[in-house]
Amino acid sequence: MALPLVLIGLSAGGLRPLMTVLRNLPPDFPAAVLVVMHLPTNKTSSLPEVLTRAGTLPAVFVQGGERMTAGRVYVAPPDHHLTVEDGHVFPWPARPDDRFVPSVDRLFDSVDVALHGYVVGVILSGLMDDGAQSLVQLVKRGGIAVVQTPEEAAFEEMPRKALITTPGAWIVNAAVMGTLLNQLITTSGALGQLNWGNETEESPA
């Protein structure tokens, strides 16, 4: 059976909304969650421990080539990108000239949507435009786009850039995003016309 994926990209100001999202996912969440968060190079990180304590799902750094399972959060380790191939997740060493480490674009671009059946790409708070170009390509391959409401993001540039390339994305506040993701995964997106905490724009069906 195909394993659905939720891919989450974030940068500055994104940790708090990420923790909120994970807190609202059920312990039996039927998808694997992959997290790419821009981190300073050559630094240690306790991100998996922080996310495990914050939510209901165990979070781990990707070691290399492990097969993904539902109900687990896979985190890009420091100085490494994250890619997906044939149901496995891999860390790839970053190069000194890489623009973003880890790269949201690189993760989103690596996923074969047809293989996994259902894939959701998420953009949270951050600076610059990582994830904007790959999110629209993910949608063209059959994925679903979800973007944090720019007005509530601590740094709205990443969400706004994502919405420029992917105007049909779901636009939601972090407080309800976990609930939305669970319903998208469990109902294959058949939600109808709903408003998820955004008072100015309607989310797509």
Image (cartoon, helix red, strand yellow):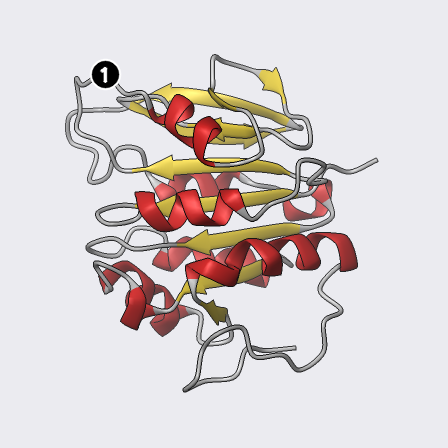
Within the image, what quadrant is residue 68 found in?
top right
Outermost residue on the top side: it is 63
Answer above or below: position of 51 versus 14.
Answer: above
Q: Amino acid at mark 1?
A: Thr
10 Å crowding of disc 1: few (<14), some (14-19), many (20+): few
- Choose between 74 and 128: the one closer to the eye: 74
Answer above or below: position of 55 versus 143.
Answer: above
| In this rendering, position of residue 69 left or right of residue 175 | right
Residue at image location 54% in from the left, 73% down from the top:
196
Q: Position of residue 9 (x, y in %)?
A: 39, 46
Answer above or below: position of 75 versus 44.
Answer: below
Would residue 136 be seen by someone viewing this image from the given angle? Answer: no
- Mark 1 highlights which residue? 44
| In this rendering, position of residue 91 left or right of residue 95 | right
Which quarter of the figure is the C terminus placed in?
A: bottom right
Residue at image location 35% in from the left, 26% down from the top:
47
Outermost residue on the bottom side: it is 200
Q: Position of residue 42 (x, y in %)?
A: 17, 17
- Choose between 46 and 65: the one closer to the eye: 46
